[in-house]
Image (cartoon, grey):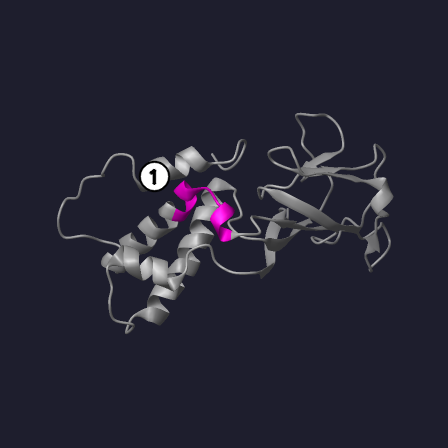
Amino acid sequence: MSKSAYIEASRCKFPVSYTEAAEHLRVDSSDDRDYIEALISAATQYIEGVTGRATTSTTYTLVSPSWEAILDADTGGSWIPLNRFPLISVSSVEYIAEDETEPTTMDSGDYTALILTQPGGVKLPDTLPDINPDRPDAIRITFTAGYDNAYDLPPLMRHAIKLLVAQWYENRVPVAGVLLHKIPYTLSDIINNQRAKGFFV
């Protein structure tokens, strides 16, 4: 059976600039600029994935084959958590009704976006429309999450991205020839500290 998925539609910028990353790496030459910028992008994606936090204002679409796949079973109601934090706004809730092929947009007055909870989410009507069971994309919720200003991001998150960029920059293959020891209170500890409640065990 198809599962729900988050699709990133657009991103304003990255929370760590090339200049900041180069300073952290103590790199003076611009020869590796493209490579370092690619590492910033990859590190940002990784840190967001394991913490549940969107680092900068980003638009996502939650796509699901059914209401049941995304409703919060613990609440027993019609609450859908949007697992990217902090939630800024919900643009639309669309569904493909049973026996239909084109999406219907739910009236914005029929649902409530809760942006102050962690995670934020959407409170839907108690009675939900039947949807097309043959469409893995039967439900689409488009929303924006993240921080408008990169400097509003918790400093620990920005530092975690720099640490991961440095780790990948210095170790370009997935194996090492010597036994290394983890330094306490660094990357994995920061990630665990910054996980949004309820995200990604």
Residue of label 1: 188
In percent of width and height, residue 141 lies at 71, 49
The answer to whether one can see residue 103 in this image is yes
Secondary structure mostly seen in the magenta stretch: helix
The answer to whether one can see residue 129 in this image is no
At x 30%, y 61%, the residue is 22
Left-right relation of 178 to 151: left
Magenta span contains residue 156: yes
In percent of width and height, residue 179 lies at 14, 44
Above or below 72: residue 88: below
Q: Nearer the viewer, residue 20 or 62?
A: 20
In percent of width and height, residue 47 lies at 43, 47
At x 86%, y 53%, the residue is 99
What segment carries the magenta color?
A: 150-158
Q: Nearer the viewer, residue 11 or 152?
A: 152
Q: Residue furthest bottom?
A: 31
SS of the residue under disc 1: helix
In percent of width and height, residue 82 lies at 64, 41
Above or below 83: residue 151: below
Left-right relation of 57 to 162: right
Instruction: Please name the amino acid that badge 1 sits on.
Output: Ser
Label 1 packing within 10 angstroms: few (<14), some (14-19), many (20+): some
